[in-house]
Every structure is written in C-alpha cells, then in structure tokens.
Image (spheres, rainbow, N blue to C red):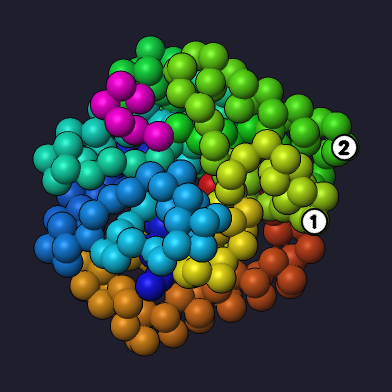
Amino acid sequence: MRVPIITYHAIGDMPSPLWTPIETFDAHLSAFAKCGYRTITLTKLLTHLNLQEPLPENSIVITFDDGYESVYQHARSLLKHYGFTATIFLISDYCGRTNQWSGQPSSVPVETLLSWEQARELAAEGYEFGAHTRSHLSLPTVLLEVAESEMHISQQQIQNHIGQKVNVFAYPYGATNAAITKLAQQHFDGAVITDLGFVHSETNPYMLNRIDAYYLSPLWISHMHGSLFQQYLYLRQMLRSFRRNFHPDWLLLPSHSRNIHLE
Ligand SMILES: [Zn+2]
C-alpha cells in the first residue's frame, strides 16, 4: 500500500503557487472524500512505518507548511465539513508574525502566520503540529550547531505553547543532507521532504516524499494510484531535479525564478 502525503501552504486567492484557492481546496477535499480516503496524522503513518506494520488502506496525510493563518480562517471549516484532519508545520519564531523571514523572496505575498492561541485551538480539535525550524533557514547552509538548535528549539517551543508532543519535522525547502537527517533522527520520529512521490513500506521515515497540491486536480486525485499519475509525478520530479542540478544555487533563487513554489 502506498500513502500520499499532500503539501499545502496558504489557502486563498493570492497570485502565487504557494496559495491554493478556496474553491480548489474544496474540490480537492471533495475528491479525496469521493475516492474514500481517510486522513491520518503523520505520526500515525510513522507508527505503522516504524513498526513495519502494513500501511492503512485508503489513508492520506494532509500537511500545511509554514502555518499560515488562512489554514485557521479557510481550511479548518472545510476540513471539518469532510471530517478530515491535518498536520501543520510551524516556524516557531514567526508564530503570530508574517511570513517575512530572511530569504523570503519579495514576490511572495505577505500573510500572517498562526498565533499560538490559534494553534492551541486547532490542537484541541485534533490537528497535529510539527516543527519547521525557528526561522526557516536552509539547514545544509548553516553550521551544524545552528541547524540543531533550529530543529530542537522549535520543537520545544511548539511543545511548550501547545502542550502536545512534537514528533515530526519538515526540512525548510526540503533541503537536507546526511548530517541534518541524522539530527532529525535524534529529535523526531520522522521528517518530510519535498521530492514528489508516495510513502510505501520501504520508505526512509526521515525522507518522506510528498505530493505538492499544486500538481493535483480532482481528476488526478481520482487516479492517484494509477500508473499515469506515477509517470506524471516522475516527470515532474525529473524536471525539478534538472533545475536543481542546472542551477547549483537553486535553493537560493527566488521562487519565481525557480518556476516552482515550494516550501
Ligand atoms: Zn516552509
């Protein structure tokens, strides 16, 4: 069994691939429901992976990176309508502030991020929270001590504010290397990247592929386990890898230059 982990960022009509329009988000959820998917938290998926139990059938994990306030304002009521839950990755130094962290391209619209109070409310409704560092640094570009504090302190801050254990991590920009992944192993049960693909029983829990919502449509959702969608994802991933190799500084380029959104 393969389980898709879907990546969303903000919900709304901003002119950026990081924003999923409300109607599109609703159409995605409606398609997930029609196809019989049930949402599970990332921790639940990792429990199955780590215990080498069969992955639960018809399961899907919905994730939101960066913890935008529109998750609270718009996604929450729609998720509730369909009986779905999600895992939200917070940037702990930026809760209640805007998405203007260092390195954020000026082309990305400004939006407020979830306050701790809103996050607590969502946690009480069953949402899972994961860490996404303190300040959204690309971890392979900083000293290992800095990377570790970004990971570990963000985990502690979220736990302290929300009163929920934080088991999962999202590498900013999906960027990691052997040393960073080892740090993730010391502090978390698993971690997500941005490479496109499904999770299956052999997947490394600290290199969990995801499927960016930008590439989804209700039609693709209804054929998500078919070979055509696999080929589509494979081609998209090839293009992304090519861009990264072609531009060694790919991660540092503004997202509009990368022609893909991400993270
Ligand atoms: Zn991010």
Which residue position is annotated with label 1? Answer: 178
| Amino acid type, label 2 | Leu
**Between marks 1 and 2 in the image, the one whose residue lies nearer the viewer:** 1
Q: Which mark is residue 143?
A: 2
Residue 227 lies in the magenta-colored region: no
Question: 118 or 207, which lies in front?
Answer: 207
- Residue pictured at 54% horizontal, 14% vertical: 160
**Coordinates of residue 37 in the picture (x, y in percent):** 22, 60
Horizontal arrangement in the rendering, residue 213 relative to residue 251 (left or right): left
Task: Please tell me how crowded label 2 is: few (under 14), some (14-19), or many (20+) other residues with Cα within 10 Å.
Answer: few
In which image quadrant can residue 87 be found? top left
**Coordinates of residue 207 in the picture (x, y in percent):** 62, 58
| Amino acid type, label 1 | Ala
User: Where is 146 relative to 261, above or below?
Assistant: above
User: Where is 224 relative to 61, above or below?
Assistant: below
**Coordinates of residue 17 in the picture (x, y in percent):** 42, 52
Horizontal arrangement in the rendering, residue 19 relative to residue 252 (left or right): left
User: Where is 104 relative to 2, above or below?
Assistant: above
Residue range (magenta): 123-128
Q: Secondary structure at mark 1?
A: helix
- Residue pictured at 69% horizontal, 29% vertical: 152
Q: Which mark is residue 219?
A: none
**Coordinates of residue 11 in the picture (x, y in percent):** 31, 40
In which image quadrant can residue 6 be found? bottom left
